[in-house]
Image: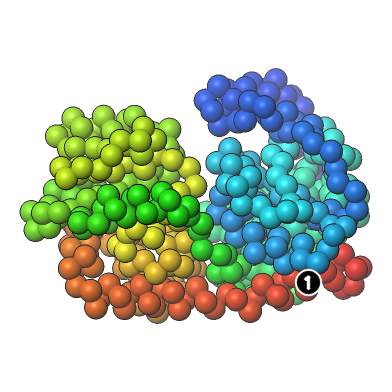
């Protein structure tokens, strides 16, 4: 009954769904050469042999899959891994970082036609969902083909929990399709058990297993030389409204740290024009990376509006504010900065990473701030007190080491499913 209603609604909405994809295409949110993948049309030949399909929502989830993909491909010449995501940014990052034997496609929209077209062509031997990407047709049609299904690093926020409770029994039917479930926290495990999932493993967070973000040596040397005589801090993955808070903190800090340089990496690089205009109209000197503008002695802000270079800036900046946390966006992933020995700060809105935040705070590995005033104060302390900065960074590095044992266990569970073992 649930699926009948769901698919009936999608059928009636078909013209609007296609129109929505076209609007995303015009806005640069779909790949013009590959957007037909969203309708289940492949853009490459299926490799012969065994194929493992991993679905990850976006950037963070796809990056966390990389260590698992490498382990699953090790010594397996007749095996390939297909990873699907829904964003152009994640596709670009996967193109750059996937190992030999793995490739990317965009996930099909969740209509029966698109999903069946996708599954009929790729015919995976097992299917792995990461975190919280629940699409009814994708799950039901995969299960109908008797493809073993796994939900790894499952995450269910309080908002998602409340939403799914209102859908009656649909979520219970969906979750019953998974043959194996691993939750990244006991809280998520409790919420999944509420919906009828049994035998959940809770062994840690797969994101702790991710490798350090990559960087290129020549750009690193050039940026290090350009900032060598400056005191530099980073506002990473910022959302709309946060750049104004960072700018106010910069004004306060500049009164005490004359050589201050503030680096901003916006979560969405397409906002760069807007950010630059607001900063320059406020009287700041801004250099923009995508335009190859150089950092000079009087540069106040370096606007890093490029994709896939956070690894570079985390290596340049020892003090980092994680964006999305002063705006009401649920925060961005702090583990990438922790893995590169940064002293980390974030605001009060970190609901997307609540379990990770709890681990960091309990181990004195990060600072949580209420507002922009506290951001300025904390940044000053971390930039001027080397012992405090070093201790925070060391503790953060120790926290991310806890996930190393998890990777081997998860890989074994995947191999068991491929071999038909329970």
Residue 87, picture quadrant: top right
Q: Position of residue 110 (x, y in %)?
A: 73, 38
Q: Nearer the viewer, residue 399 or 78?
A: 78
Residue 268 in the image: state x and y as whole percent: 44, 39
The vertical placement of 394 against 112, above or below, is: below
Residue 104 is drawn in which quadrant?
A: top right
State how the image is colored.
rainbow
Report the number of discs: 1
The local secondary structure at tag 1 comes to helix
Comparing 14 with 26, the one in front is: 26
Q: Quadrant of the N terminus?
A: top right
* For residue 80, above or below residue 205: above
Q: Is residue 87 above or below residue 51?
A: above
The x, y position of residue 117, in whole percent, is 84, 35
Residue 166 visible to an observer of this rendering: no
Q: Which residue sits furthest left?
A: 255
Q: Is the residue marked by circle 1 packed among few (<14), some (14-19), or many (20+) residues within 10 Å?
A: some
As drawn, is 66 to the left or to the right of 265? right
In the picture, the quarter occupied by the C terminus is bottom right
> Can residue 117 be seen in this snapshot?
yes
Question: In the picture provided, is 365 more to the left or to the right than 170?
Answer: left
**Residue 400 at x, y = what percent?**
50, 73
Residue 78 in the image: above or below residue 27: below
In this rendering, would 350 be left or right of 38?
left
> In percent of the image, x 88 and y 57: which residue is there?
78
Q: Which residue is mark 1?
A: 413
Residue sitting at x 21%, y 65%: 383
**Residue appearing at x 27%, y 72% in the figure:** 389
Q: Nearer the viewer, residue 58 or 166?
A: 58
Q: Residue at x 60, y 76 (%)?
A: 404
Q: Quadrant of residue 239?
A: top left
Q: Is residue 344 left or right of residue 32?
A: left
């Amino acid at each position: 009954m649930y699926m009948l209603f769901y698919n009936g609604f999608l059928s009636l909405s078909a013209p609007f769904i296609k129109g929505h994809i076209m609007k995303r295409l015009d806005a640069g949110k779909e790949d013009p050469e590959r957007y037909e993948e969203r309708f289940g049309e492949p853009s490459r030949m299926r490799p012969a042999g065994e194929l493992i399909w991993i679905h990850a929502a976006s950037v963070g989830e796809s990056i966390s899959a990389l260590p698992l993909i490498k382990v699953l491909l090790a010594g397996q010449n007749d095996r390939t891994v297909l990873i699907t995501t829904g964003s152009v940014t994640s596709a670009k990052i996967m193109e750059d970082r996937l190992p030999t034997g793995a490739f990317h496609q965009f996930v099909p929209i969740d209509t029966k036609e698109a999903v069946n077209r996708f599954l009929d062509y790729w015919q995976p031997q097992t299917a792995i969902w990461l975190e919280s990407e629940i699409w009814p047709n994708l799950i039901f049609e995969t299960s109908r083909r008797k493809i073993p299904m796994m939900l790894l690093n499952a995450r269910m926020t309080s908002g998602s929990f409340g939403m799914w409770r209102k859908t009656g029994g649909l979520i219970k039917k969906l979750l019953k399709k998974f043959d194996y479930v691993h939750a990244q926290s006991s809280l998520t495990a409790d919420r999944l058990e509420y919906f009828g999932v049994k035998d959940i493993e809770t062994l840690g967070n797969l994101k702790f297993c991710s490798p350090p973000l990559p960087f290129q040596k020549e750009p690193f040397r050039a940026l290090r030389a350009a900032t060598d005589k400056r005191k530099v801090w980073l506002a990473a993955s910022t959302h709309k409204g946060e750049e104004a808070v960072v700018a106010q903190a910069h004004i306060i800090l500049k009164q005490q740290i004359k050589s201050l340089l503030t680096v901003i990496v916006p979560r969405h690089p397409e906002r760069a024009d807007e950010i630059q205009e607001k900063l320059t109209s406020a009287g700041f000197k801004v250099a923009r990376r995508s335009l190859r503008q150089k950092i000079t002695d009087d540069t106040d802000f370096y606007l890093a509006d490029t994709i896939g270079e956070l690894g570079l800036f985390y290596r340049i900046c020892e003090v980092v504010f994680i964006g999305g946390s002063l705006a009401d966006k649920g925060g961005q992933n702090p583990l990438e900065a922790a893995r590169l020995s940064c002293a980390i700060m974030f605001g009060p809105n970190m609901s997307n990473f609540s379990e990770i935040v709890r681990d960091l705070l309990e181990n004195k590995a990060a600072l949580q701030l209420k507002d922009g005033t506290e951001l300025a104060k904390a940044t000053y302390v971390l930039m001027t007190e080397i012992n405090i900065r070093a201790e925070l960074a060391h503790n953060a590095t120790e926290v991310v080491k806890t996930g190393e044992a998890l990777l081997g266990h998860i890989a074994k569970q995947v191999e068991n499913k491929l071999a038909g073992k329970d």
